Amino acid sequence: MSKNKLRKFAELAALPNTYQNFNVQEPGSLTDHEGNQADLKGQWQEKHFKNNNPIVLELACGRGEYALQLGRAFPDKNFIGVDIKGARIWKGATIATKENLTNIAFLRIRIEQIDYYFDKDEISEIWITFPDPFLRKSKSQKRLTSARFIALYQKILKKDGFVHLKTDDPTLYEFTLETLEEDKNCNLLYSNNDIYSGDLFTPELEYKTYYEAMHLENGKKIKY
């Protein structure tokens, strides 16, 4: 591991807006910036955010660009960026700390274990922004909109909660539509295979990640 990555991991561990699971064999186990065990399931509003504002997740958040933009725009909501890559989370967590964005936190865990970290009805919305599409059919169950993951989201979302997908990949987009059509517990409210061709369905769509800007420059259509 490079010295730069080691430095980022050390700095990440000391940030008060970040919680990490260091052992996937113990899902639900979290360590805070002081090295203590943090029991936050069902208590994120009370113990971390210190308010009753709704909680929004950004899954596979990478550097947390979307969570940061949403957090700045909507101070009356709490945002948690979730990813397994510590060196990536470090960027967003550092920026949020410097800007004193107390409504943004980061969680370093495996997403397939997410129901160990949030309680029933604890989450209001989930954003999935430009995830790995896992294009090989043999890996389709790794897609964050597969039936396997949708079932996990249903465990933690409020009854009227939303899941948003933003992607440039047509395979993932079509796969998601098919998955939702087969799930009787889901209602598809809106879909668009070229969101910037007209008025945006929701204002949050105007925010762009680094990769989205790059995809647009390359002429790709953004789907929602």
Image (cartoon, grey):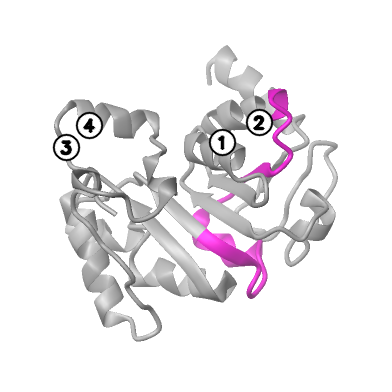
Residue 187 found in image quarter: bottom left
37 left or right, relative to 138 = right
Residue that carries the numbered disc 3 in the rendered image: 220
Label 2, on which residue? 96
| Label 1 sits on residue | 68
193 vs 168, nearest the viewer: 193
Q: Are marks 2 and 1 in contact (CB under 8 Å)?
A: yes
Q: Is residue 128 left or right of residue 9?
A: left
Crowd tier of the residue under label 3, counting other residues whose Cα lies within 10 Å: few below 14, some 14–19, many 20 or above: some
Q: Are marks 1 and 4 in contact (CB under 8 Å)?
A: no
CA gap, disc 2 and disc 1: 7 Å
Residue 121 location, x and y as percent?
Answer: 63, 74
Relative side of 187 to 113, left or right: left
Give the residue at the far front of this rendering: 199
Give the total number of marks visible in the rendering. 4
Q: Give residue 151's position: percent from left, percent from top.
A: 45, 74
| SS at badge 4 | helix
The vertical placement of 143 against 215, above or below, is below
> Residue 78 at what x, y percent from top left?
66, 51
Q: Residue at x 55, y 54 (%)?
A: 57
The question of residue 29 being in magenta is answered with: no
Q: Amino acid at mark 2?
A: Ala
Q: Residue furthest bottom?
A: 184
**Does the residue at mark 3 contact the one at mark 4 (Cβ under 8 Å)?**
yes
Separation of residues labelled 1 and 4 (CA atoms) = 20 Å
State which region is magenta: 96-125
Real-space CA distance between mark 3 and mark 4, rounded to the nearest whole angstrom: 5 Å
Q: CA distance from mark 3 to mark 2?
A: 30 Å
Q: Quadrant of the C terminus?
A: bottom left
